[in-house]
Each structure stands twice: as C-alpha cells, then as structure tokens.
Image (cartoon, rainbow, N blue to C red):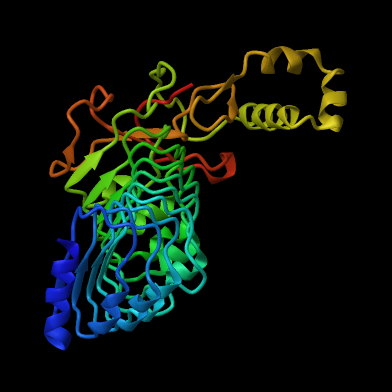
Amino acid sequence: MTERLLIKALSGGKNTKIITLNGKKMTKMPSALGKLPGLKTLVLQNNLIPKVCPELRTLTQLTTLNLGNNLLEEVPEEMKYLTSLKTLHLSGNRICRFAPGACDGLQNLILLNLNNNHLIQLPQEVSRLKSLTYMSINYNQLVSIPRELCFLKNLVELQLNYNQLICIPEEIKFLKKLQKFLLARNNIGVLPEELCDLKKLRILDIAGNIIQIFPSGFQDLKLREFYCEGNPLFLKQPVISTQRENVWSLQEITSRFVMNQLAENNPFIMDGIERYPQVRSMISQGKTCAICGQHFITVWLECVRFVSPPKDWKISKNLQLVPLRVLICSYKCFTQRDPNLFGIAQV
C-alpha cells in the first residue's frame, strides 16, 4: 500500500503537493521524497521512523511537516534547509536534543509541537525562530526556561505543562505578545514580578506547583482564565492584626536588626548580646513571618495583603482560597516600608 501511494505521488512530479502516510508501520523515511520538490505538506505520523532521510533537505517549499509518534531521538539538522516550513509536529517521539544548526533556517516557522518527548533543556539557538507564534513542550523534562526563548517577540502561546521547571526567568517580560502561558504541574516556587509586565496575557495556568504568594501587581493582570489549584498558598494560620501606629518604634527597628543579624551568625552581635539580658529576653519573644522569613516583635502589616481578583477572571472552581483572594507579598525591608498595605499578616 505504501509503495503504491508513493508511486502515485511520484507520477505527479512537481505537481504533488500533499503526501499523507499515517500509521503505515514505516521504519524509514522514503528517499523518493527528494523527487518531489514542489511538496507542501508531508504527514508521516504514527510510524516507526528513527531518523529522517537526507533527501528531506530538498523540500524547500514544504510548509507543514508532521513526524509525530515516531522514534526520532533529535530534532534533525536537515530541518535547517526547510526554509518555507511554518508548522512542525514532532510530538510523541524520543527527542532529547536538537542537532547543531537545526534551527538555523526555520525563520518562517509559526508552530512548533514537541509534546511528549525527553527534552531536558532547549538550545540557545531557539532564539532564531523569529516568527514562532505557538510553542508547545508539554510532558518533557525541562528544568529551566532559556532566556533566549524570552526574546521570541511574536510568541502568543507557550505551553510548558508537566515538566520539572523550578523558576521563570526575569526576561519573561520581553514576551509582550504572550496571551496564553501554561505551566501546570512543575516545581515552580516563585512567580517573578516581571510576569506582571505581560499586559496581553489572558490565560495563565500555574496549577500543581509550589507557589505560596503572588508578586505585587499580579491583581492588575487582565486575565480571563486563571488556574492555580494545588499550590500551598496557605502554609500557616493567619493572625488577624491591626496596625496601631503609623511609624515603628525605635525598639522595634533595633530588635529586628539584632534578630536578623543573629540569624546570620554575626559574631560581633552574638558576643555583645550576652552582656544585655534584657535585650535577650525581649528578642526571645520574636516571631518569624511565614511568608518572607523576616523577624519581628510587634505584628505589622507591611509584609502581605489580600487583594480581591478582578471580577472578569475565570478561576478554577476548586481553588483552595477561602475567601477567594490573591495573596501579595510586598515585603522589602523596614527601611522601604509601604504604609498603605492592608489585610491579614501571616506570622
């Protein structure tokens, strides 16, 4: 059957524009493809192809290539010759690397699908995909987002669900056109403040990470859909507090300084504190903020606040916030205190 289809395609010569050979149990890519320079679409998914044939590089008019669900172990070098390619599907393979130069000629690529592979990292050369608009790398083993990825100025959708990411680079702010950002089921602990610079972001999924708080300004994002269930947003019971004074007492400022220095094992402070039992007694009553880890004697509200999310946000129903509010940490230090913060301080 495969041979008959190829013979029929070859008979069309330059006029053959589309070849679809799905699920034919092919173990290699047919070299006869080199005789079809006018080919626009090539679909060879659900086969047993371990590598591409050298003749692939002759298909310079190809706009769509689907090699999903095969046995490829790398994004091959031959890709750089496909200068007209706009859509590339490589999901469901065994890809763990990019061949050197694979991205060089893909200046017109719009969609890249690398779901369900074995990628641990992305090469710096990914920054050469200048036209890339949709990128999906779900179900891989990525541990970081390369800064170079953040310079793909046309990127509208970025899917990185089910990886092993631990952080988001500050350079994420350069993805000015990003509208959909999916990061579910990773190991991300902190959202950078630069995320709030993504003014066009409409869908954000951070479910199943280890995020405790949201950056200041997060409530200003114009999200339409927001998913964050499965994060430890509450670690300890909050303590309700009122701010009694507008300024700190000298005792509070000094106590905090001493406690923070003791936490850093400052030898000078540790030696001096032994001579002042009253000071030792006072700071022994000190507490530590559950959010930022800073020390205090008197409960103040400079560290955290609750902000109700905009009404037009579509939020996952099983969100573990009762009442539903966004927890913002604005703690800098006692010399940069914002007197306008309000809400419930966690200690």
Q: Is residue 164 left or right of residue 56?
A: right
- Residue 164: x and y, percent? 46, 41
Count of labels in the image: 0
Q: Identify the residue at horizontal 54%, vertical 22% (top origin).
A: 298
Q: Identify the residue at horizontal 30%, vertical 81% (top origin).
A: 34
Q: Is residue 347 left or right of residue 78?
A: right
Q: Is residue 147 above or below residue 92?
A: below
Q: 4 or 74, which is in the foreground?
A: 4
- Residue 239: x and y, percent? 41, 17
Q: Is residue 191 above or below residue 130?
A: above
- Residue 109: x and y, percent? 29, 73
Q: Quadrant of the N terminus?
A: bottom left
Q: Is residue 58 left or right of residue 243?
A: left
Give the farthest residue toward the bottom: 14
Q: Is residue 174 above or below residue 299?
A: below
Q: Is residue 294 above or below residue 78?
A: above
Q: Identify the residue at horizontal 17%, vertical 28% (top origin).
A: 317
Q: Is residue 311 left or right of residue 162?
A: left
Q: Identify the residue at horizontal 48%, vertical 27% (top origin).
A: 300
Q: 19 or 320, which is in the foreground?
A: 19
Q: Quadrant of residue 80?
A: bottom left
Q: 240 or 53, which is in the foreground?
A: 53
Q: Quadrant of residue 272?
A: top right
- Residue 299: x and y, percent? 50, 23
